[in-house]
Amino acid sequence: MIRSILIVSILASLVACQPAADREILFELPTSVPDMAIPADNPTTAAGLELGRYLFYDPILSADSSQACADCHFQDLAFTDAQAKSTGALGPTGNRSAMSLANVGLYYNGLFWDGRVQNLEAQSLHPITDPKELAGEWPGILSRLRKNADYPARFKAAFGLERAVDIRPEHVGKALAQFERSLLSFDSKFDRVQRGEAAFTVSELRGWNIFFDANPELPMAECNHCHVDPLFSTLQYENNGLQQLKGNGEYADNGREVVTGRTSDRGKFRVPTLRNITLTAPYMHDGRLKSLEEVLDHYNSGGHDGLTVSPNVRPLALSEEDKVDLLAFLNTLTDSTFITKEAFSNPF
């Protein structure tokens, strides 16, 4: 079943009086999906969303106008970039892999691998000035936007700014956030099976049972403890035994601990979604695993020990047949409409 989420609270009697660009946007979500948290000061409108789409694909936000947000988030790769670690506009390589943006507007428990920010308005500004990403500086960015032949009118339509000089970083962040909230992906084969529109193959169904630990006669893969339907993530932070502790008791990347300061968060990273997972290689926070076969081998081995490693990470004793069927199920999470939808594509 589908429910409509009102992105802007507004009296129905006033809607007909509004300009089209200012009207509320209705997103359709499965009933099992949590509500989308929208800041009161950034309701999604057609003009704001379209401005965000332009900014997402425009290299104008980078230091030398050479790189856009989209250069690390390609639509056909479920808004990832096929790199272990992305290369920034000025050449440096980032510390972690670019995450998929599918359904990112539904993430209520922090963003980035370590949860350092709480909403998309803040998240969208970080890469713009990060020296390892777009490496921009706001005085130059704002100057280019204000002098651009197109953007002042778009900012006026989106935010009511009468003068180009009124364009501020927060308006850029709000527009990008509106676009990113629109990136919804709920039309995979898995979703169609849930809606009664398709059926799993024998292999996919066996993989489903192993994934969800749903059949006591089949092995338990422990996947569903962290990758819960419908988002295929708990949105929590876990240590999956990927890294080996160094002699000083720390990891090469301490993950969530860097943000919280708690040793109990050492080596923990946000559980990524598995939606469109076949499109988003390489895998893990540092892209060290090149294929889903390597991912399954990692979990089958039980990973590395550590005080903060999840108890669900253990040797699994999965057979080759089990892994083949798990991969068949994971393939059903690919949403071909998401990666081809024109509304998400480059508008230039």
Image (cartoon, rainbow, N blue to C red):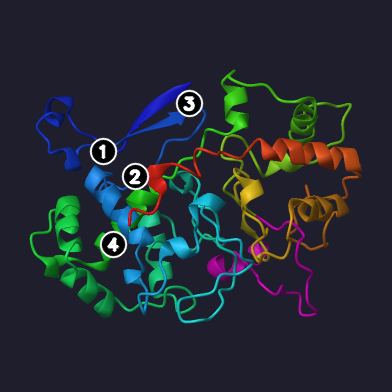
- In the displayed orientation, state which residue is furthest to the front: 348
Cα–Cα gap, marks 3 and 1: 19 Å
First of labels 1, 2 by sequence position:
1
- The quadrant holding residue 51 is bottom left
Residue at disc 4, secondary structure: helix
> The disc labelled 2 sits on which kind of residue?
Ile
> The disc labelled 3 sits on which kind of residue?
Thr
Looking at the figure, which quarter contains the C terminus? bottom left
Residue at disc 1, secondary structure: loop
1 or 4: mark nearer the eye: 4
Residue 72: percent from the left, percent from the top?
50, 64
First of labels 3, 1 by sequence position:
1
Residue 29: percent from the left, percent from the top?
44, 31
First of labels 3, 4 by sequence position:
3
Circle number at residue 31: 3
Residue 224: percent from the left, percent from the top?
70, 39
Cα–Cα gap, marks 1 and 4: 19 Å
Residue at disc 3, secondary structure: loop
Up/down of 123 relative to 279, above or below: below
Residue 151: percent from the left, percent from the top?
20, 62
Residue labelled with disc 1: 8
Cα–Cα gap, marks 1 and 2: 8 Å
Q: Callout 1: 10 Å neighbours few (<14), some, many (20+)? A: some
Is mark 1 in CB contact (under 8 Å) with mark 2?
yes
Q: Callout 4: 10 Å neighbours few (<14), some, many (20+)? A: many
Residue labelled with disc 4: 172
**The magenta segment:** 238-265
First of labels 1, 4 by sequence position:
1
Question: What main secondary structure does the magenta stretch of the protein show?
Answer: loop
> Is 324 a magenta residue?
no
